Image (cartoon, rainbow, N blue to C red):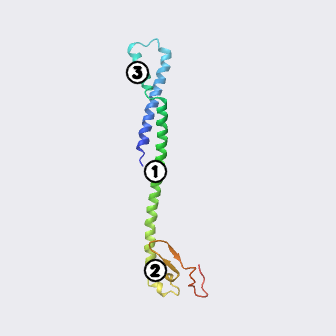
Amino acid sequence: VGGGGATTTGTGMMVTSAMKQTVATNEKKNNSVALVLQGGERKEMDYWTRAAHVVNEDTVQVWDQLDKSLKSYNKVLAQRESGVREMHELEEQNRGLRNLLQTYLDSGLNDELMIPPSATMSIDMTGESTTGKDSGNWPSGTHRA
């Protein structure tokens, strides 16, 4: 999820952009000093002009699109990672709550109540719990919450 591919692509795009800027600067200088340039300086200018055009525009567009796509994919992976972390936290919280509920249900205090909670609900400790509200186990004169 580190996005290494997007970083590498971004660096490549910066190099290409820097090369284009250098050539553009050199070409501007060329217009004013083209007649003055001699031998080695002319070769250097030609070198930078050729270097700027090593990668054609179609390839640059492909790399730009790849860069955008990799950044988008990295964002999706980060969201998935966040969702997985949240799921693990909720699972841990759920285990703790199930243990607490089991502790309450196993308590001797429940046996002393007129209507023990265990008589009003069916609990599956590995799945969902369902209340016994519709079971008809309510004594007359009591109200359901």
| Residue located at (50% from left, 15% from top) | 32
Q: Which residue is mark 1?
A: 77
Q: Secondary structure at mark 2?
A: helix
In whole angstroms, how far apart are the C-alphas of marks 1 and 3? 42 Å
Q: Secondary structure at mark 1?
A: helix
Q: Amino acid at mark 1?
A: Leu
Which quarter of the figure has residue 143? Answer: bottom right
Q: Position of residue 135 (x, y in %)?
A: 56, 81
Q: Are marks 3 and 2 in contact (CB under 8 Å)?
A: no
Q: Are marks 2 and 1 in contact (CB under 8 Å)?
A: no
Q: Is 128 located above or below residue 80 in the figure? A: below
Q: Amino acid at mark 3?
A: Tyr
Q: Position of residue 83 (x, y in %)?
A: 47, 57
Q: Which numbered dot is residue 105?
A: 2
Q: Which residue is mark 3?
A: 47
Image check: 113 left or right of 51? right
Q: Is 33 located above or below residue 66 in the figure? A: above
Q: Amino acid at mark 2?
A: Leu
Crowding around mark 2 (Cα neighbors within 10 Å: few <14, some 14 to 19, many 20+) is some
Name the N-terminal-most of marks 1 and 3.
3
In whole angstroms, how far apart are the C-alphas of marks 2 and 1? 42 Å
Name the N-terminal-most of marks 2 and 1.
1
Crowding around mark 3 (Cα neighbors within 10 Å: few <14, some 14 to 19, many 20+) is few
In whole angstroms, how far apart are the C-alphas of marks 3 and 2? 83 Å
